[in-house]
Amino acid sequence: MVSYFIPIMNILQGMLTLALTICAMTSRPCHCRPMRHHVNHKKLREARIEAIKHDILLKLGFSGVPDVTRINTTIIEKRRKIRLYKKSLEETQGKIHELFQEEEYFAKTFHSFTDQGLPPPGVMDAVWRRSSRPRFYFQLDVPQPKIANRELHLHSATLNLYKYRTWPENLRDSSNFDRTVSVSVYQFLVPLDCACSKPMRRLVSTKVVSLLDTGWESFDIRSAVRLWMDKPKQNYGLEIVCESQDISDIIDFNSMRSNMINDIFGYSLAETLLPNLSVYVQEKEILGRVKRSPEVYDCVQGDGESRCCRYPLWVSFRDIGWNNWVVEPEGYQAYYCDGSCPHRYKPAHTFAGIKSAIHLVNPAAAPEPCCTGTKLSPLTLLHYDEWGLLKVTQYSDMVVQECKCA
């Protein structure tokens, strides 16, 4: 009986190791337990690396390691791929930087402003309506923080325009078979007056708009609203432009200047389709929370830290026998998450905090939060494929950038 029991225990321990590996390497929360001191760290590291190897081959669609005897790449092609690989790395670094730009700790307050069809203060109505291009002015009214050590930060600002009529047949470009145009939002930098033949403007947002349907179109205009919040007196309004031809020939956005839409939808419904500006703001402590770099809280096994933390995990492609088909890099830091999640410690989001509170009161009602990767970045490889061709491939969610409790 004992001879059967030992292999079964080994199998169960292996299953536990695999579960820990999957939990630590993915961004999806799962019910896992932090490592205990009696765990064999060497075997656990090997299990993690095996999981990484399996994941890379799976994402490549390979049944196994490529056969390098079929490699047939010229020097010129190899140089071109190396340049492409370096360019991909530069773009990846930019994406990693963006991961830590947004601060989601503080609550966001929503404000909505509707265009009333009025020009900015000091601008005559006749001057404002002189152009056939749509022009909008939103009077921002965002309350400032009442607490002295807090300041207002703009989280998002979206201009929403309803296109209720389009005329794709009026397109000047006869080769434009998909019936799309580039629509831009410009911010006036100076107030309009009769002397300005070409008013000073700044491009705020551009997107491709289809003329084959009606409905809402949204534009990110954070740069304009951020200036208006800092300097309200410099809010001189917006202008909508089609870069290829007069926008009034192909699109009719609903506005207070549009009378026909009242007849089509009725005034009450037409009012809900007016141009509007959606703004989310956050009150933040001026000298409070300082953004950290991802490496600040890295831990090392055996340093005494038992709570949720990020640990280094170097994967050497030479050590695992992949250096014959992986050209660059020689290896990479995958990192992994481990540790306990005591109440209110590093919650990944609001739900994680609620879950932790419920577990504290009634452990049977909700499991304890799990230490897991909440921000992950891609890995870029310069490698040969199964046909011996050199390729640059990017794999998402391969490098743990941040560990929190979820």
Image: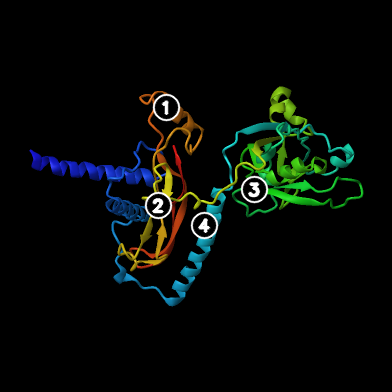
In the displayed structure, would residue 327 be above or below residue 250? below
Q: Quadrant of the C terminus?
A: top left
Which comes sooner in the sequence, label 1 or label 2? 2
Look at mark 4 in the image and give the residue it sits on: 92
Which comes sooner in the sequence, label 4 or label 2? 4
Mark-to-mark CA distance, 4 and 2: 26 Å
**Do the residues under discs 3 and 4 have CB atoms within 8 angstroms?**
no
- Mark 1 crowdedness (10 Å alpha carbons): few <14, some 14-19, many ≥20: some
Residue 4, disc:
none
* Front disc: 2 or 3: 2
Question: Nearest the camera: 314 or 74?
Answer: 314
Question: Nearest the camera: 293 or 385?
Answer: 293
Q: Quick check: can you spot residue 28? A: no
Q: Is residue 108 left or right of residue 376?
A: right
Q: Residue at x 27, y 49 (%)?
A: 40
In the displayed structure, would residue 361 be above or below residue 57? above
Mark-to-mark CA distance, 2 and 3: 47 Å
Amino acid, disc 4: Thr
Residue 360, disc:
1
Farthest residue toward the right? 195
Mark-to-mark CA distance, 1 and 4: 40 Å
* Numbered disc total: 4
- Mark 3 crowdedness (10 Å alpha carbons): few <14, some 14-19, many ≥20: some
List x then y, in percent, for residue 83. 50, 69
Q: Quadrant of the N terminus?
A: top left
List x then y, in percent, for residue 74. 41, 76
Residue 207, disc:
3
Which comes sooner in the sequence, label 2 or label 3? 3
* Front disc: 1 or 4: 1
